[in-house]
Amino acid sequence: MSRNKNLIQFNPDILTELSIEESHSKIRACIQCGECSAGCPSGNWTAMKTRKIMRQALVGLESVLSSNDIWLCSTCFNCYERCPRTIPVTEIILKLRNMAVREGHIPDPLKGVIKNLVQHGHAVPLGGELSTWAKLRIKMDLPPLPPTVHSYPEAMDELYTLINKIKFNGRIPYQL
Ligand code: SF4
Ligand code: SF4
């Protein structure tokens, strides 16, 4: 039977999984005061509302995992500092991201960043504007690129090991 996409879907596993970690289970004490939203720099510039994310997670709204909002958090921890119920809001958002990835919800721009990281050891590609810098560096008798991860095969090996350990293969299109 096909699922009606307009129906609101609830997933009790969201709260169950959050409750595994004692500190995360403090989300149950959220009084929806909005202090977290009021001090959120990301929320100042986007439609993301931290208070809303907490509410959605608390009631187990499935769409919180597919929403882009959880990816707009800059992990500044302002909300954590301001919450009168000492709820670790930032950590809960990070946990929601973990759940979202497991469910296959990864925003396309983020997939691109991860692909760059896996292919080059850099989240930002080493082409484009960098080629201008490369010419300048050569003029200054420097190697065209700074000696970062891509210059050290052993560091790339460690990166691949980490990615394999967290079973990221298959979720992100990349070539080793
Ligand atoms: S500040 Fe804390 S209690 Fe208030 S809405 Fe945010 S998470 Fe809930
Ligand atoms: S940690 Fe994230 S949700 Fe909390 S205030 Fe900073 S940007 Fe907003």
Image (cartoon, helix red, strand yellow):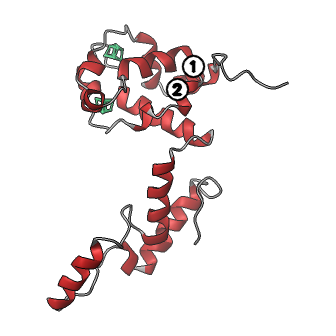
* Residue 131 appears in the rendering: yes
Q: Position of residue 126 (x, y in %)?
A: 36, 72
Q: Nearer the viewer, residue 142 or 14?
A: 142
Q: What element carries label 2?
A: helix
Task: For label 2, count other residues whose C-alpha is less than 10 Å away and answer few (under 14), some (14-19) or many (20+).
Answer: many
Name which quarter of the figure residue 73 lies in: top left
Residue 44 rendering spot, x and y as whole percentages: 25, 27
Residue at coordinates 24% horizontally, 31% vertically from top-left?
41
**CB-based contact (under 8 Å), mark 2 and mark 1:** yes
**Is disc 1 placed on a helix, strand or loop?**
loop
Q: Residue 61, which numbered label?
A: 1
Q: Quadrant of the C terminus?
A: bottom right
Q: Where is residue 52 in the image (x, y as percent from the top left)?
A: 41, 18
Q: Which residue corresponds to the image point at 50% horizontal and 31% vertical from the top-left?
A: 67
For the view shown, which residue lies furthest in the right direction?
1
User: Is 126 placed left or right of 168 in the picture?
Assistant: left
Q: Mark 2 points at which residue?
A: 64
- Mark 2 to mark 1: distance in Å? 6 Å
**What residue type is disc 2 on?**
Val
Q: Quadrant of the N terminus?
A: top right
